[in-house]
Image (spheres, helix red, strand yellow):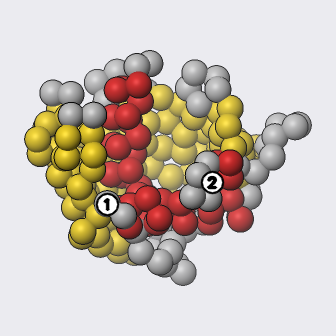
């Protein structure tokens, strides 16, 4: 996968999740069950991308806080509304792309099925377009698949290309 494609994926995911986290974490935001999670994201014109993550309560909170830090620096407007098992987010952000500054507007709705699954539908608009994309509709879903594997520690993420890293080792964490 090219670095430009990875950049577009990261920006799109930020649009779906980061904006929701650009404020203090609401106390009633649904929590994910500790263990190994499998997450799929699609809508970038290619195949669905699958990532796995080993989570515990502290790592889940750390991921939210990392999103808070990242999007708080880029988003001028954001709104998060938690309605029981549904989280609705709207954001307006300025992001730096390889070809200059881009205005991004996003809306997403995430539905949680207890603490073991969720699904998100989102729509993102870019002005100017990024890599020929002025709009993008994305879906993502995640589900708990069991305990973390032997040797994994909370924060370990396995990317679609098989590369593993720990989010706790990322700058700003």
Which of the numbered marks, if any, corresponds to residue 116? 2
Residue at the extreme bottom: 27
Q: Is mark 1 on a helix, strand or loop?
A: loop
Q: Which residue is drawn at 53% across and 60% down?
A: 66
Which one is in front, 162 or 43? Answer: 162
Decide which of tag 2 and tag 1 comes sooner along the chain: 1
Q: In this view, does 77 lie to the left or right of 87?
A: left
Q: In which quarter of the image is residue 136?
A: top left
Percent from the top left, x then y, of residue 143?
A: 59, 45
90 relative to 106, above or below: below
Q: If the image is split into quadrants, where does the C terminus sit?
A: bottom right
Q: Inspect this view and state whether residue 3 appears.
A: yes
Which one is in front, 18 or 173? Answer: 173
Which one is in front, 52 or 21? Answer: 21
105 relative to 138, above or below: below
Percent from the top left, x then y, of residue 81?
A: 35, 74
Q: Residue at x 68, y 32 (%)?
A: 164
Percent from the top left, x then y, of residue 61?
A: 62, 66
Q: Quadrant of residue 91?
A: bottom left
Percent from the top left, x then y, of residue 104?
A: 21, 51
Q: In this view, does 3 lie to the left or right of 103?
A: right
Q: Inspect this view and state whether residue 90 appears.
A: no
Q: In this view, does 124 lie to the left or right of 16?
A: left
Q: In this view, does 132 lie to the left or right of 147?
A: left
Front position among marks 2 and 1: 1
Which of the numbered marks, if any, corresponds to residue 74? 1
Label 2, label 1: how far apart the Cα atoms are: 31 Å
């Amino acid at each position: 996968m090219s670095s430009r494609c990875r950049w577009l994926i990261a920006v799109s995911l930020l649009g779906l999740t980061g904006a929701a986290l650009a404020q203090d974490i609401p106390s009633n935001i649904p929590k994910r069950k500790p263990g190994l999670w499998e997450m799929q994201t699609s809508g970038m014109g290619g195949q669905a991308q699958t990532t796995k993550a080993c989570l515990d309560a502290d790592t889940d909170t750390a991921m939210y806080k990392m999103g808070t830090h990242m999007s708080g620096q880029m988003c001028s407007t954001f709104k998060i509304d938690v309605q029981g098992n549904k989280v609705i987010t709207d954001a307006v952000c300025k992001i730096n792309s390889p070809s200059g500054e881009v205005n991004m507007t996003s809306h997403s709705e995430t539905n949680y099925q207890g603490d073991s699954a969720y699904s998100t539908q989102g729509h993102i608009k870019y002005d100017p377009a990024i890599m020929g994309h002025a709009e993008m509709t994305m879906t993502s879903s995640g589900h708990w698949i069991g305990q973390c594997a032997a040797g994994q520690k909370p924060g370990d993420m396995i990317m679609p290309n098989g590369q593993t890293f720990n989010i706790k080792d990322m700058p700003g964490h």
